[in-house]
Amino acid sequence: MKTNRTIILCLLALALSLGNTAASWAGKKSDMRVNYVLQNIGVKRDTQAKLKPLLVSYMADKKTANKEYDGLKDKLKPAIENGTLTDKQADKLLQLKWQADEKELAVKRQYETKFKTVLPSKKVYLCFDLLNDSKSKMSGGKSRDKDED
């Protein structure tokens, strides 16, 4: 009987520890991207600490810039996939896409200046490059040259 309780307690402890680990893996996509950039940009920890809040706010502003377009695209996803998208819907998507692109470019230019307060220009370029890496590349963990600033 004691053996069964011990086994049950061990399994419960294991399940709880796995639950916490899974919760830590399930962070937002933007958090994953921010952590990826911080790990691969090759700067000291104090610079990473200054850069992290900028990256978080950049991701939020970029998401806001694309919000209207992304919302309509998600709403029309079945029509897009089925090939039943109307010309009127496509025109609206295109209009919103170009507006979102303009807003996103404005956000990128704004954050270029902010990033340069923390990083040299070479690292700012690398930062934007890392921010544009694909999800598969981020999960694969290919890192960049890690020279110190």
Image (tube, rainbow, N blue to C red):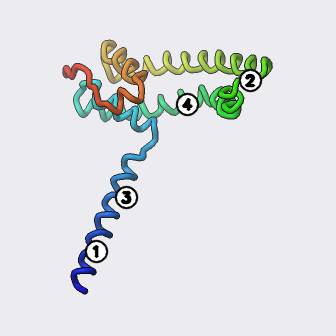
- Which residue in the rendered view is the most extreme toward the bottom? 1
Q: Residue at x 65, y 15 (%)?
A: 98
The answer to whether residue 23 is left or right of residue 76 is left
Q: How far apart are the two marked residues, 3 and 2, measured between alpha carbons?
A: 42 Å
Amino acid type of the residue tagged 3 in the rendering: Gly
Label 3 neighbour load within 10 Å: few <14, some 14-19, many 20+? few
Can you tell which of label 4 and label 1 is closer to the viewer?
Answer: 1
Query: Which tag, 2 or 1, sits closer to the chain's start?
Result: 1
> Is mark 4 in CB contact (under 8 Å) with mark 3?
no
Closer to us: mark 4 or mark 3?
Answer: 3
| Residue beneath disc 1 | 9
Above or below, 29 relative to 80: below
Report the residue marked by disc 4. Answer: 63
Q: Which mark is residue 149?
A: none
Task: Look at label 2 and name its amino acid.
Answer: Leu
Q: Which residue is disc 3 drawn over?
A: 19
Residue matched to label 2: 85
Which comes before the other along the chain, label 4 or label 3? 3
Spatial CA distance of label 4 from label 3 is 29 Å
Tell me how far mark 2 sits from mark 1, CA to CA. 55 Å
Could you say which is closer to the camera, residue 107 or residue 136?
136
Asked if the residue under mark 3 is in contact with the one under mark 1, i.e. CB atoms within 8 Å, the reply is no
Q: Amino acid at mark 4?
A: Lys
Circle 1 packing at 10 Å, graded few (<14), some (14-19), many (20+), is few
